[in-house]
Image (cartoon, rainbow, N blue to C red):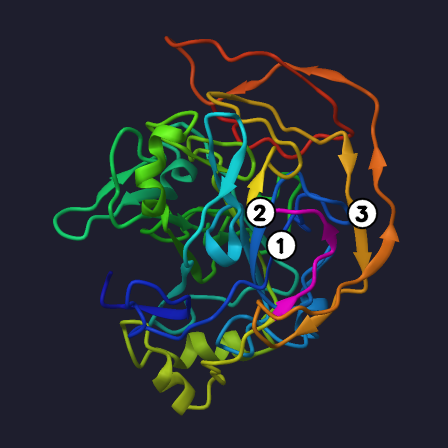
Amino acid sequence: MASSETILLFVLLQILGLTQLCVVNNILTTQRLDPIVTPGEVSTHVHSVLGGSGFGLNVNTSILQESECTSIPIQEDKSNYWFPASSSLARSAYRQKNDGSFASVSGNAVMLVYYLFSDSANVTTPFPNNVRDTTLRTLNASSFAQQAVTFLCLQFSGTSNRYNELPVGVSCPAGIRSQINFPSCWDGKNIDSEDHKSHVAFLSTGPDNGTCDDPRYPVTLPRIFMEVYWISQDFEDQRDQALTPSQPFVFANGDPTGYGYHADFVNGWEDGVLQKAISGCNCNPYGDPSCCVDAGIFTFNQTRQCFISNTVDEPVLGNLSTLPGANPVQAPCFESYIATSTPVILAPVYTYVASASIQLPSGTLATSATVTLATQTAVGTCIWKGAGSPSKRLKITYKGIEDLQYQDC
């Protein structure tokens, strides 16, 4: 990290003794929603969500700013951050057993979200209202979108090796850490784009280095960097029970490779607060926010937990016969898959500040379950070509196409 760059580390979920950096927090919800890609509808796969309790089928900055609580310790940050993978409180990653069924990954979740910005004045611009940021990968090794996501095979001692995909054929005794950089150069005009990524770009020399010198993307935004620690070591003694022992894990979208890993962000910061943080929160280069709190830049609650009740009424944890949304496990060729049925939608959504283990009220039937009968044979989009077994053609049923994530192969 350059000396002229400040890190604002604002959320840490406790595990492995990493509490010295920040505070214990929680996952807001885990369910099949994605208000960027499929607004107003059930998403194709499960996401784990952090942030403001205003999260739901549709979100924007004004909705999030009115959130009753946030699962982020900085109480003025009611943004939402979500990703298709986590563990324990947010078990949207799964282990595929040799009978074809799935078990959600157990253990405690750790997640760190960093905001990185220059100490120099007038360099970084806070996120505009309603801006949406999505990370989607390709297999093009020269693409910054591919380089933006990596995985660490964590060791208790020695070197933790980095991979571009989920580690195959190796043991990771301290778990697996997924890492993702968001684009941080903005076109200065559009808060979203048709593909949810063309309005932003990565820095000039890589996802974590460089400047916004492309005239098409001249505005520098804070760089968001997310880490999720997977407690995959809990399954080491069960590898022989997996359908694919060399790499037994699969993301909620049916991806067993890691090339489908992604994350999303919708701005929900209270007006003016992020600008104050960019301008004045450079008192600690290692991410400790306490001096920023002392300066009155934002408030910081280390104990308040925030949860919301489910909108989508379906099981997403435990032992499952299929992945939620009936996503097939697909590699190396992928096709966006929409399930033939849609679960019941519940309303209203309840917000509560309490333990997730407490039985709390849920909404009642708002929209009945539906079944779609039309069928189509998927052709498949390959993330790599060349030698190897061709992927099977899948006969699937769907009512729409989700944004394909593998466009540059």
The residue at the point 57 percent across, 57 percent down is: 49
Crowdedness near tag 3: few (<14), some (14–19) or many (≥20) residues, C-alpha within 10 Å: some
User: Closer to the camera: disc 3 or disc 2?
Assistant: 3
60 left or right, relative to 182:
right
Give coordinates of residue 352: x percent, y percent: 66, 74
Contact, CB < 8 Å: mark 1 with mark 3?
A: no
Sequence-first disc among 3 and 2: 2
Looking at the rendered structure, the kind of residue marked 3 is: Val
280 left or right, relative to 311:
left
Crowdedness near tag 2: few (<14), some (14–19) or many (≥20) residues, C-alpha within 10 Å: many
Quadrant in the picture for residue 387 = top left
Contact, CB < 8 Å: mark 2 with mark 1?
A: yes
Residue 118 is at least partly visible in this image: yes
Give coordinates of residue 350: x percent, y percent: 73, 69
Looking at the rendered structure, the kind of residue marked 1 is: Lys
Viewer-closest of 60 and 173: 173
In this view, 72 is above or below 293: above
Task: Give the number of the disc on residue 199.
Answer: 2
The magenta segment is 307-316
Task: Give the number of the disc on residue 344.
Answer: 3
Q: Between marks 1 and 3, how big is the CA–CA gap?
A: 38 Å
